Each structure stands twice: as C-alpha cells, then as structure tokens.
Image (cartoon, rainbow, N blue to C red):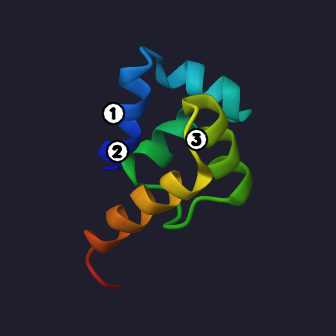
Amino acid sequence: MRLWLKKLREDKELTQQNVADHLGVTKQYYQMIESGNRAKDLSTSIVMALAALFNISAIEILRQEQAYQKTLPND
C-alpha cells in the first residue's frame, strides 16, 4: 500500500473520490493506485496532477514513490 499517498490525502482531508475526480479517473482506479495494485509506475500525468493537488513538487512525489518501490519484493 502506498501509505505516503494515503497520508497526503488524509492530511488534506480528501476522500478517494475527491482525488479521483481531480485526477480524472474513477474512484476504483484511484483505489488501485493508492493500494499499490495498479502498475508499479505512476504515469507522468498522475504524478503532475498529484503534485498540483497536494501542493508539493513532482520530485517529492517521485521520491516517495521510489522509496515505496524499494519496499516491494523483486519480481
């Protein structure tokens, strides 16, 4: 699970639906992103939209994602 992403969302008091609407995706799709069940890599458009929504740099999003990826078992 991408706990860093859930924390950002909860810190802004947003629901998964709020974030999904901002990203232009379904709630189910966003749930898969947050839970880690979506492809390992976040798309550039998702990274940029998350950075704008949470008012942080895209670099910080990528750092958080890189740290998350290191926790995953190697395939």
Point out residue 1 in the picture as x, y percentages from the top left corner.
31, 50
User: Residue at left 58%, top 19%?
Assistant: 18
Point out the tag, 3 or 1, that comes first from the N-terminus. 1
Q: Is residue 3 left or right of residue 55?
A: left
State which mark lies toward you, 3 or 1.
1
User: Which amino acid lies under the numbered mark 1 shown in the image of this protein?
Assistant: Lys
Query: Dots 3 and 2: beta carbons under 8 Å?
Result: no
Front residue of 19 and 7: 7
Residue 29: mark in rendering: 3
Q: Which residue is mark 1?
A: 7
Is label 2 in a helix, a strand or a loop?
Answer: helix
Whole-Å distance between the Cαs marked 3 and 2? 17 Å
User: Residue at left 74%, top 51%?
Assistant: 45
User: Which amino acid lies under the numbered mark 2 shown in the image of this protein?
Assistant: Trp
Q: Which quadrant is the C terminus positioned in?
A: bottom left
Query: Dots 1 and 2: beta carbons under 8 Å?
Result: yes
User: Residue at left 54%, top 31%?
Assistant: 54
User: Residue at left 55%, top 21%?
Assistant: 17
Mark 2, other Cα within 10 Å: few <14 / some 14–19 / many ≥20: some
Q: Which residue is mark 2?
A: 4
Is label 3 in a helix, a strand or a loop?
Answer: helix
